[in-house]
Image (cartoon, rainbow, N blue to C red):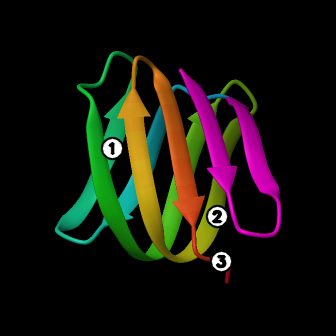
């Protein structure tokens, strides 16, 4: 699936990912390939991205995630 992590200032990540774990406001959840469409708010915490290059971790201060047709867009308020 394609993942983009954006802040108001810049594009933090853009590329392919096999899984993305995010800190949802109702609890942490993981997005995998062919995930059902979803829009969710995020709280401060770690975003874990697993891809061909290994695991990358980003610390966000809240935001929103949208998953649709194997495209994931994460709009983060800011990185900490």
> What residue appears at the point 51 percent right and 68 percent down from the top-left corner?
46
* Alpha carbons under labels 2 and 1: distance apart: 15 Å
The residue located at (79%, 53%) in the rendering is: 11
Q: Secondary structure at mark 2?
A: strand
Q: Residue at x 57, y 37 (%)?
A: 50
**Front tag of 2 and 3:** 3
Earlier residue among tags 2 and 3? 2
Q: Is residue 18 magenta?
A: no
Residue at which label 1 appears = 30
Ranked by sequence position, the earlier of labels 3 and 1 is 1
Residue displayed at 29% across by 55% down? 40
Residue holding disc 3: 78
Left or right of residue 15: residue 77: left
In the image, the segment drawn in magenta is 1-15
Image coordinates for residue 14, horizontal then vertical, percent? 74, 37
Task: Residue 75: give x, y in percent of width and height.
Answer: 56, 58
Q: Quadrant of residue 51?
A: top right
Q: Magenta region, mostly helix, strand or loop?
A: strand
Confirm or deny contact between disc 3 and disc 1 (CB under 8 A). Answer: no
Q: Earlier in the sequence, mark 2 or mark 1?
A: 1
Q: Are marks 2 and 1 in contact (CB under 8 Å)?
A: no
Residue 33 spot, x, y in % from top left: 40, 19
Membership of 5 in magenta stretch: yes
Relative placement, left or right, of 48 versus 8 is: left
Where is residue 45? Give x, y as percent. Answer: 46, 76
Mark 2 = which residue?
Answer: 58
Q: CA distance from mark 2 to mark 3?
A: 10 Å
Does dot 3 land on a helix, a strand or a loop? loop
- Residue 64: image quadrant is bottom left
Q: Secondary structure at mark 1?
A: strand
């Amino acid at each position: 699936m394609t993942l983009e992590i954006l802040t108001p200032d810049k594009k933090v990540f853009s590329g392919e990912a096999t899984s993305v774990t995010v800190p949802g406001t109702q609890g942490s959840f993981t997005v995998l390939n062919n995930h059902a469409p979803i829009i969710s708010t995020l709280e401060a915490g770690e975003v874990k991205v697993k891809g061909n290059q290994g695991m990358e971790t980003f610390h966000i201060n809240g935001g929103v995630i949208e998953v649709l047709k194997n495209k994931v867009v994460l709009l983060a308020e800011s990185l900490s």
